[in-house]
Image (cartoon, grey):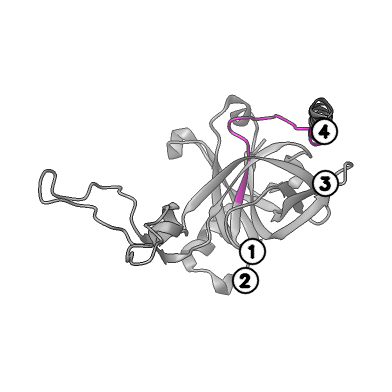
Amino acid sequence: MPVGLIAKKLGMAELFNEQGRAVAVTVLEAGPCTVTQVKDPAKDGYQAVQVGFEPVKESKLAKAQLGHFKKAGSGPFRYVREFRLGGKADGDQPFAVGQQLTVELFKEGELVDVTGVSIGKGFQGGMKRWHWKGGPRTHGSTSHRRVGSIGSTTTPGRVFKGHHLPGHMGNERVTVQNLRVMKVDQEANLLVIQGTVPGPERRLVLVKKSIKKAGVIVAAKGIQEAGVEDEEKGKSKGAAKAKAAAKKK
Protein backbone atom coordinates (compact mmCIF):
# COMPACT_ATOMS: atom_id res chain seq x y z
CA MET A 1 0.00 0.00 0.00
CA PRO A 2 1.17 3.56 -0.61
CA VAL A 3 2.46 5.31 2.47
CA GLY A 4 0.34 8.44 2.28
CA LEU A 5 -1.91 10.99 0.60
CA ILE A 6 -1.85 14.69 -0.21
CA ALA A 7 -4.44 16.57 1.82
CA LYS A 8 -5.68 20.04 2.72
CA LYS A 9 -6.33 21.23 6.25
CA LEU A 10 -9.96 22.36 6.48
CA GLY A 11 -10.01 23.33 10.14
CA MET A 12 -10.51 22.03 13.68
CA ALA A 13 -13.55 20.67 15.46
CA GLU A 14 -14.34 18.47 18.44
CA LEU A 15 -15.86 15.04 18.95
CA PHE A 16 -17.37 13.51 22.07
CA ASN A 17 -16.60 9.98 23.19
CA GLU A 18 -18.94 7.73 25.17
CA GLN A 19 -17.69 9.25 28.40
CA GLY A 20 -18.87 12.67 27.23
CA ARG A 21 -15.35 14.06 26.97
CA ALA A 22 -14.55 16.48 24.17
CA VAL A 23 -11.67 15.44 21.91
CA ALA A 24 -10.03 18.08 19.68
CA VAL A 25 -9.74 16.89 16.07
CA THR A 26 -8.50 18.26 12.74
CA VAL A 27 -10.50 17.71 9.55
CA LEU A 28 -8.48 17.04 6.39
CA GLU A 29 -9.60 16.80 2.78
CA ALA A 30 -7.41 13.87 1.72
CA GLY A 31 -7.34 13.00 -1.95
CA PRO A 32 -8.40 11.54 -4.20
CA CYS A 33 -4.85 11.41 -5.55
CA THR A 34 -3.79 10.02 -8.91
CA VAL A 35 -0.50 8.24 -9.60
CA THR A 36 1.39 10.30 -12.20
CA GLN A 37 4.72 8.45 -12.15
CA VAL A 38 6.27 5.31 -10.66
CA LYS A 39 10.00 5.71 -10.03
CA ASP A 40 12.22 2.65 -10.34
CA PRO A 41 15.59 2.17 -8.56
CA ALA A 42 17.28 0.97 -11.78
CA LYS A 43 16.27 4.08 -13.70
CA ASP A 44 15.79 6.83 -11.13
CA GLY A 45 18.06 5.60 -8.35
CA TYR A 46 15.29 5.18 -5.79
CA GLN A 47 11.81 3.73 -5.49
CA ALA A 48 8.87 6.10 -5.07
CA VAL A 49 5.34 6.87 -6.19
CA GLN A 50 4.52 10.35 -7.51
CA VAL A 51 0.92 11.44 -7.04
CA GLY A 52 -1.11 14.46 -8.15
CA PHE A 53 -3.82 16.27 -6.22
CA GLU A 54 -6.51 18.81 -7.16
CA PRO A 55 -7.16 18.97 -10.93
CA VAL A 56 -6.37 22.30 -12.61
CA LYS A 57 -6.84 23.90 -16.03
CA GLU A 58 -4.04 23.40 -18.56
CA SER A 59 -3.74 27.18 -18.96
CA LYS A 60 -2.56 27.40 -15.34
CA LEU A 61 0.54 25.25 -15.92
CA ALA A 62 3.79 25.59 -17.83
CA LYS A 63 4.58 23.58 -20.95
CA ALA A 64 7.07 21.40 -19.11
CA GLN A 65 4.45 20.47 -16.51
CA LEU A 66 1.85 19.73 -19.20
CA GLY A 67 4.36 17.54 -21.04
CA HIS A 68 4.97 15.53 -17.88
CA PHE A 69 1.25 14.89 -17.37
CA LYS A 70 0.65 14.07 -21.05
CA LYS A 71 3.51 11.56 -20.98
CA ALA A 72 1.90 9.94 -17.95
CA GLY A 73 -1.51 9.98 -19.63
CA SER A 74 -3.14 11.65 -16.63
CA GLY A 75 -4.90 14.96 -16.26
CA PRO A 76 -3.07 18.09 -15.05
CA PHE A 77 -2.89 18.62 -11.28
CA ARG A 78 -2.12 21.64 -9.16
CA TYR A 79 0.02 19.76 -6.63
CA VAL A 80 2.48 16.90 -7.20
CA ARG A 81 4.33 15.10 -4.42
CA GLU A 82 6.37 11.90 -3.99
CA PHE A 83 6.14 9.14 -1.41
CA ARG A 84 9.17 6.92 -1.12
CA LEU A 85 8.73 3.17 -0.79
CA GLY A 86 11.46 1.77 1.40
CA GLY A 87 9.91 -1.33 2.98
CA LYS A 88 9.47 -4.75 1.45
CA ALA A 89 5.72 -4.58 1.89
CA ASP A 90 5.58 -1.38 -0.13
CA GLY A 91 7.94 -2.61 -2.80
CA ASP A 92 5.93 -5.77 -3.43
CA GLN A 93 2.79 -3.78 -4.29
CA PRO A 94 2.30 -2.96 -8.00
CA PHE A 95 1.51 0.63 -8.90
CA ALA A 96 0.16 1.82 -12.21
CA VAL A 97 0.12 5.31 -13.67
CA GLY A 98 -3.42 6.66 -13.50
CA GLN A 99 -4.29 4.62 -10.41
CA GLN A 100 -6.50 6.56 -7.98
CA LEU A 101 -5.74 6.61 -4.27
CA THR A 102 -8.39 7.54 -1.70
CA VAL A 103 -8.87 7.68 2.07
CA GLU A 104 -9.46 3.91 1.99
CA LEU A 105 -5.71 3.65 2.61
CA PHE A 106 -6.34 4.47 6.27
CA LYS A 107 -8.47 2.80 8.91
CA GLU A 108 -10.20 4.26 11.93
CA GLY A 109 -7.90 4.11 14.94
CA GLU A 110 -4.72 3.88 12.82
CA LEU A 111 -1.71 6.02 13.71
CA VAL A 112 -0.40 8.42 11.06
CA ASP A 113 2.31 11.07 10.63
CA VAL A 114 1.28 14.47 9.25
CA THR A 115 3.83 16.79 7.61
CA GLY A 116 3.17 20.44 6.86
CA VAL A 117 4.57 23.97 7.00
CA SER A 118 3.97 25.70 10.32
CA ILE A 119 2.31 29.10 10.58
CA GLY A 120 4.81 31.91 10.02
CA LYS A 121 5.03 34.43 12.87
CA GLY A 122 7.66 36.77 11.44
CA PHE A 123 10.51 38.24 13.51
CA GLN A 124 9.96 37.49 17.21
CA GLY A 125 11.85 38.15 20.40
CA GLY A 126 13.58 35.54 22.48
CA MET A 127 10.83 35.26 25.10
CA LYS A 128 8.23 34.21 22.55
CA ARG A 129 10.57 32.28 20.27
CA TRP A 130 12.58 30.38 22.90
CA HIS A 131 10.42 30.80 26.04
CA TRP A 132 12.97 32.85 27.98
CA LYS A 133 12.14 33.58 31.60
CA GLY A 134 13.03 37.25 31.20
CA GLY A 135 14.95 39.69 33.36
CA PRO A 136 14.05 41.31 36.69
CA ARG A 137 10.60 42.90 36.79
CA THR A 138 11.25 45.22 39.71
CA HIS A 139 11.32 49.02 39.56
CA GLY A 140 14.43 50.39 37.88
CA SER A 141 15.23 47.36 35.73
CA THR A 142 15.67 48.03 32.02
CA SER A 143 16.11 44.40 30.94
CA HIS A 144 12.65 42.92 31.17
CA ARG A 145 12.66 41.21 27.78
CA ARG A 146 16.09 42.05 26.41
CA VAL A 147 18.75 39.61 25.27
CA GLY A 148 21.43 40.84 27.61
CA SER A 149 25.15 40.20 27.33
CA ILE A 150 25.99 37.29 25.02
CA GLY A 151 29.65 37.85 24.13
CA SER A 152 32.98 38.69 25.69
CA THR A 153 36.28 40.34 24.79
CA THR A 154 38.22 37.25 25.88
CA THR A 155 38.17 33.72 24.50
CA PRO A 156 36.20 32.86 22.44
CA GLY A 157 35.31 36.50 21.77
CA ARG A 158 32.36 35.60 19.58
CA VAL A 159 28.83 34.22 19.72
CA PHE A 160 28.57 30.47 19.22
CA LYS A 161 26.57 29.29 16.24
CA GLY A 162 23.09 28.11 17.17
CA HIS A 163 22.74 30.41 20.18
CA HIS A 164 19.09 31.16 21.01
CA LEU A 165 18.43 34.72 19.90
CA PRO A 166 15.53 36.73 18.45
CA GLY A 167 14.81 35.96 14.81
CA HIS A 168 12.42 34.48 12.30
CA MET A 169 9.83 32.17 13.87
CA GLY A 170 7.62 29.59 12.18
CA ASN A 171 7.18 28.83 8.47
CA GLU A 172 9.17 25.61 8.83
CA ARG A 173 8.53 22.05 7.72
CA VAL A 174 7.12 20.19 10.72
CA THR A 175 6.09 16.55 11.16
CA VAL A 176 3.72 15.51 13.94
CA GLN A 177 3.94 11.78 14.58
CA ASN A 178 1.51 9.13 15.84
CA LEU A 179 -1.75 11.01 15.43
CA ARG A 180 -4.84 8.81 15.68
CA VAL A 181 -7.40 8.64 12.87
CA MET A 182 -10.79 9.18 14.49
CA LYS A 183 -13.05 8.90 11.42
CA VAL A 184 -12.76 8.11 7.71
CA ASP A 185 -15.42 9.53 5.38
CA GLN A 186 -14.97 7.86 1.99
CA GLU A 187 -17.85 9.70 0.29
CA ALA A 188 -16.56 13.18 1.17
CA ASN A 189 -12.83 12.22 1.09
CA LEU A 190 -12.34 13.40 4.66
CA LEU A 191 -9.98 12.29 7.41
CA VAL A 192 -10.71 13.30 11.00
CA ILE A 193 -7.49 13.15 13.01
CA GLN A 194 -7.14 13.57 16.74
CA GLY A 195 -4.95 16.49 17.76
CA THR A 196 -3.47 19.42 15.87
CA VAL A 197 -1.85 19.52 12.44
CA PRO A 198 0.87 22.03 11.42
CA GLY A 199 -0.07 24.95 9.20
CA PRO A 200 -3.04 27.29 8.72
CA GLU A 201 -6.37 26.36 7.16
CA ARG A 202 -6.40 25.46 3.43
CA ARG A 203 -2.67 24.68 3.61
CA LEU A 204 -1.30 21.54 1.98
CA VAL A 205 -0.19 18.67 4.23
CA LEU A 206 1.05 15.11 3.70
CA VAL A 207 -0.61 12.28 5.60
CA LYS A 208 1.56 9.17 5.87
CA LYS A 209 1.35 5.91 7.73
CA SER A 210 3.21 6.04 11.01
CA ILE A 211 6.89 5.21 10.71
CA LYS A 212 7.51 4.34 14.36
CA LYS A 213 4.22 2.46 14.89
CA ALA A 214 3.28 1.16 11.45
CA GLY A 215 0.01 -0.76 11.40
CA VAL A 216 -0.84 0.00 15.05
CA ILE A 217 -4.55 0.64 15.59
CA VAL A 218 -5.57 2.34 18.84
CA ALA A 219 -9.18 1.42 19.62
CA ALA A 220 -11.63 3.90 21.12
CA LYS A 221 -11.69 1.78 24.29
CA GLY A 222 -8.26 3.17 25.15
CA ILE A 223 -9.73 6.66 25.59
CA GLN A 224 -12.73 5.33 27.52
CA GLU A 225 -10.56 3.23 29.82
CA ALA A 226 -8.37 6.25 30.51
CA GLY A 227 -11.45 8.19 31.58
CA VAL A 228 -12.54 5.38 33.91
CA GLU A 229 -9.05 5.24 35.45
CA ASP A 230 -9.13 8.99 36.11
CA GLU A 231 -12.50 8.66 37.82
CA GLU A 232 -11.23 5.78 39.97
CA LYS A 233 -8.15 7.80 40.95
CA GLY A 234 -10.38 10.72 41.89
CA LYS A 235 -12.55 8.47 44.06
CA SER A 236 -9.50 6.99 45.80
CA LYS A 237 -8.10 10.47 46.50
CA GLY A 238 -11.45 11.57 47.89
CA ALA A 239 -11.61 8.55 50.17
CA ALA A 240 -8.07 9.19 51.42
CA LYS A 241 -8.95 12.81 52.25
CA ALA A 242 -12.06 11.71 54.11
CA LYS A 243 -10.04 9.23 56.24
CA ALA A 244 -7.44 11.92 57.03
CA ALA A 245 -10.18 14.34 58.11
CA ALA A 246 -11.76 11.67 60.33
CA LYS A 247 -8.43 10.99 62.08
CA LYS A 248 -7.95 14.68 62.83
CA LYS A 249 -11.40 14.83 64.49
Residue under the image location 48 percent in, 64 percent down = 121
Tell which circle, 2 or 3, labels the residue nearer the N-terminal end: 3
Instruction: Name the amino acid type tagged 2.
Output: Lys
CA–CA distance between discs 4 and 3?
Answer: 21 Å
- Residue 57, numbered label: 2
Pointer 3: residues within 10 angstroms few (<14), some, or many (20+)?
A: few
Q: Which quadrant of the view contains residue 53?
A: bottom right
Instruction: Name the amino acid type tagged 4.
Output: Gly
Question: Are the residues at dot 4 and dot 3 in contact (C-beta closer than 8 Å)?
Answer: no
Q: Is residue 139 above or below residue 35?
A: below
Q: Is residue 171 above or below residue 35?
A: below
Which range of residues does the magenta coloring cover?
206-233
The residue at which mark 1 appears reads as: 201
- Of residues 56 and 163, the one drawn nearer to the viewer in this rendering: 163
Question: Are the residues at dot 2 and dot 1 in contact (C-beta closer than 8 Å)?
Answer: no
Foreground: disc 1 or disc 3: 3
- Residue 21, numbered label: 3
Instruction: Name the amino acid type tagged 1.
Output: Glu
Residue under the image location 46 percent in, 36 percent down = 46
In the image, residue 197 lies at what x, y percent?
62, 52
The residue at which mark 4 appears reads as: 238
